[in-house]
Image (cartoon, helix red, strand yellow):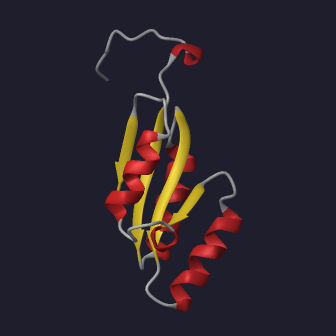
Amino acid sequence: HLPLGLNVSSHHRYKADVVVFSEDSPLQLYACLESLFAKGRDVNEVYVLYKGGDHEFQRAYLNLQSEFHTVHFLNVCDYPGNDYATLITRVLENKKHAYRIFLI
């Protein structure tokens, strides 16, 4: 155990937004979100930027949306440019929080 010298109460902690990228991998995304909500602390908002290559993947992502109703699911194909760069720029522009965590 290493003392870090941080005796900050939980109401003074900084919170981070989490941005998760997922392409044709809803099962891995499920495991990631389960772990994040079970073990993660000080998380503000969670955004999933995803792309499903066929109807089966799209349906799986829709199922995840109903299971993780507090997560913001953003289908890359629904936004102009149809790419992650355009969408992540929009997500970052609209947030005022200083801290972000990116997961792939």
Indicate left or right for 51 with 71 as reference: left
Quarter-wise, where is residue 99 in the image? top left
Horizontal and vertical percent position of residue 86: 36, 58
Q: Is residue 6 above or below residue 43?
A: above
Residue most extreme to the left:
2
Query: Is residue 58 something that shows in the picture?
Result: yes
Foreground residue among 4 and 98: 98
Q: Is residue 55 above or below residue 21?
A: below
Residue most extreme to the front:
80
Q: Is residue 58 above or below residue 76?
A: below
Quarter-wise, where is residue 80 in the image? bottom left
Quarter-wise, where is residue 61 in the image? bottom right
Q: Which quarter of the rendered picture does the C terminus lie within?
A: bottom left
Horizontal and vertical percent position of residue 1: 32, 23
Q: Residue at x 67, y 51 (%)?
A: 70
Foreground residue among 42 and 70: 70
Count of numbered marks: 0
Query: Is residue 104 something that shows in the picture?
Result: no
Horizontal and vertical percent position of residue 81: 38, 68
Q: Residue at x 50, y 40 (%)?
A: 94
Q: Residue at x 48, y 39 (%)?
A: 17
Q: Residue at x 43, y 40 (%)?
A: 93
Residue most extreme to the bottom:
55
Horizontal and vertical percent position of residue 27: 49, 75
